[in-house]
Structures are given as structure tokens and as C-alpha cells.
Image (cartoon, rainbow, N blue to C red):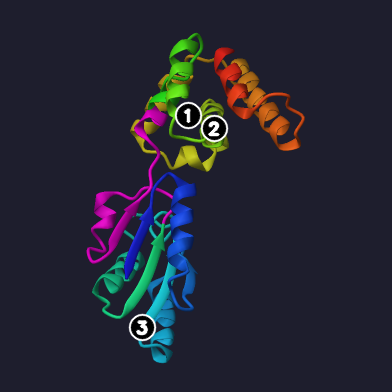
Amino acid sequence: MKLIIHGTDLESSRNFYFLQKQKLKNPVILSGEGLVFAEFFKYAQNQSIFDEETSMILENLFSKNKTGSMDVKKIAEFIDDAKNLNIILWEQVELSKTTLSLIKSSQINLFSYPKKLFIFLDQIRPNNQDALIKLYHELRQTQEAEMIFFMLVRQFRLFLSSVENKTEQIDEIKKMAPWQISKLSRQVRFFNKDELLKAYNRLYDMEYGQKTGKSDISLDASIDFFLGGL
């Protein structure tokens, strides 16, 4: 079994990952960040001495290393060619087709958020309450309020970071493709910084109220009010 699990829907991705992980016999679990081929090969060889089949798990091999890394390419080639290898590669992002093609012998499992979620996030701006609330209620037919709230918080965190100096921007901004940064920059122009801070603080208060039980209304209703107040 050679399995790649990836995608932006981390909750579903992790649940599937943990389920598949239970099927492996005493797997070696390695973090992919900074992993070199010699280290990977050592673990792969050591286990094969004691077991007929090697069981391994690699977490974030591709997403935590530079594109084109020779060590990553050698590890991927080894995995692709290996015959008696049971391995799960779990990635916290959605991988490109080019990256996935490095291990042609693997089974691919993609867990992604619905496209409507990103349409909803792209519509966030002042005086667009009707469209936002409509999209939110459509999303709620298939998605939990907690997940949508998480993405709302993330979006406003990106907004705030994008208006800072480049040296003060969060890593998530720095890792974005140029077209993503350009798109975010156009959207954030609808707000001034005070409006962004006010919205972000409201989201913080909503989260605090839900976690402490001090909120008198559900998270679902709180999001409705938040969108209506933009």
C-alpha cells in the first residue's frame, strides 16, 4: 500500500489518515521537514531487516521542503520503485499534479473544502451583507459552523497581515503564490485598518464566548450577526 493523503480540509484528511494508520504494523513515523535521503533510507533498510514488509509514515515531506529538493526527489523515487513497502504520506496542503506524479504507484486521496467556501471568502467586504449571509446559509447545508468560523478568522488574519510591512507578515502570506497575494491585496482594499482590527476583535470575542460558555447565542447565530455587521 502506497497512499498519499492531502488537501485543505484538514479535519477530514486527519480522520482518514488516522484510520489508515491503524492498518499499518508498527510503522516508522518520520517528519518530512528537512528529511534527507540518507536518514530516510536508514529507517527503511533497518525495518526491512526485521519485517518482510516495511511500514512507514511520512508527514509533510513535500509541503515542508523546497520544490525541486534532490533529497525529496530521491525519497519519492525510492518509494515509487519499492515493492515491499507500505507507506502513508500525509500532507497538510493540496499537492500539485506535478508533485503527485513523482510517486506514480501511489493511491491518491484528496480532501478539499467546497469551492463555494472560497467564493464566500472572496465576497467578504463591507456593505455586502445580503450576498454573504446567503452564501453562508448555503454552506451550512453541508459544512459545520466551526469550520466556516475557522476560515473566517484565517481570512481576517490574512487581511491584517497583508497590510503590514513585508518583514512583519505571517508565514502563510510569505508562502502564497503571486496571484494569491494580488487577489488578497485587491480584496483588502475594501477595508481600512481600523475596520479590520474591529472585525478581528469581534471574531476573537465570539470565539472566547463560545469556549467559555459566556455567549448567549450559538456560533451559527453569532456568525450571522457578524456578517450582518460588516
Of the residues shown, which amino acid type is indicated by label 3?
Glu
Quarter placement of the N terminus: bottom left
Q: Position of residue 69 (x, y in %)?
A: 34, 61
Disc number at residue 53?
3
Gap between marks 3 and 1, in whole Å? Answer: 44 Å
Of the residues shown, which amino acid type is indicated by label 2?
Ala
Q: Residue at x 65, y 27 (%)?
A: 218
Between marks 3 and 1 in the image, the one whose residue lies nearer the viewer: 1
Q: Is residue 122 visible?
A: yes
Mark 2: secondary structure: helix
> Magenta residues, as a range?
91-118
Q: Magenta segment: does it hold 73?
A: no
Quarter placement of the C terminus: top right
- Residue 163's place in the image compared with 68, above or below, is above
In the picture of the structure, the residue carrying the numbered disc 2 is 145
Q: Residue at x 41, y 30 (%)?
A: 117
Disc number at residue 140?
1
Locate residue 151 relative to residue 108 in the image: left or right.
right
Which comes before the other along the chain, label 3 or label 2?
3
- Residue 84's place in the image compared with 131, above or below, is below
Q: Position of residue 140 (x, y in %)?
A: 47, 29
Which comes before the other along the chain, label 2 or label 1?
1
Locate residue 74 relative to residue 131 in the image: left or right.
left
